[in-house]
Amino acid sequence: MTVPEAKANKTAAEAAVEAATAGAAGAEGAAGAEGAAGAEGAAGAEGAADRTAGPARPRRRQARGEARIAQLLRAAADVFCTSGYTASSTNAIAREAGVSPGTLYQFFPNKEAIAVELGDRLLDRWRDTYGAAFAQSHTELPLDRMLDAILDPLIAFNCENPAFFVLMHGSEIPGRITEAHDTLHATMLTRVESVLADYLPDLPAPDIHRIAEMAFMVFKAGLDLIMATDGEERTAYIQELKTVMYRYLDPLVGDEAACPAPTERIDTP
């Protein structure tokens, strides 16, 4: 073999090696690119799945949290009614709820916070109750039926939610609850004055206010007696309260109420 032929054969061999190397590199690159694309696609699909399922987990956690709060508030209501607000403790509330104190502190920092949350929820329901009780259709009824329509739901709410009575009348209740109760008291008194003004359009405003205040205080005093009893005795006190309210208001607004004397007409020449 001549030298030129040897060089030619060497060159051809080198070209073959280079071609084979390039082919392997291309295959490896294609496989790498395909693998990367597959991994990226899988990661994207997994991420999309996480985004799809993601919101459900916080909602479940939120639902569990709300259920736990409701459980703690029910326990607090029972403890407040049994021991009174002042003598109650977070440990007693946790024990009543069947949870550890640590679990309670995940939701409320202290007893006052529990009382405020419970008081706010009960006040919201009380507003709805008295709003429905003082519906216009009720205030247009005869006095005895009007008293039934107004007093029955108010009394029933307090009997069904004794913690409301405890939180609204205790001497050491958190100030926020007291302020909200005082505001609600003023709103209800204004509503009573409005009802009386419809019955007694000719009566001066100071007189209307005095009658409304007296009727309101009679109701509160009667409610104290009602809440201190149960069973047949409670039923009897409810009837006594209605009787007192009727006998007080009937001479003023009942069918037999004295009408204002007509103004004497004086003929002048």
Image (cartoon, rainbow, N blue to C red):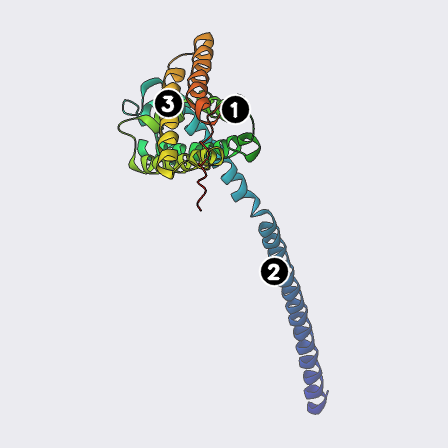
Secondary structure at numbered mark 3: helix
Q: Viewer-nearest of labels 1 and 2? A: 1
Q: Nearer the viewer, residue 257 or 208?
A: 257
| Residue depicted at x 68% and y 90% | 3
Task: Say whether residue 83 is left or right of residue 243.
Answer: left
**Which dot marks residue 218?**
3
Residue behind mark 2:
40
Q: Which residue is mark 1?
A: 255
Residue furthest out toward the top: 232
- Mark-to-mark CA distance, 3 and 1: 22 Å
Residue drawn at x 39%, y 33% is 119
Evaluate if marks 1 and 2 touch, with contact meaning CB atoms under 8 Å apart: no
Mark 1 nearby-residue class (10 Å; few <14, some 14–19, many ≥20): few
The amino acid on which the numbered mark 2 sits, given as a three-letter code, is Glu
Judged by depth in the image, the label closer to the viewer, 3 or 1, is 1
**Which residue is farthest front?**
269
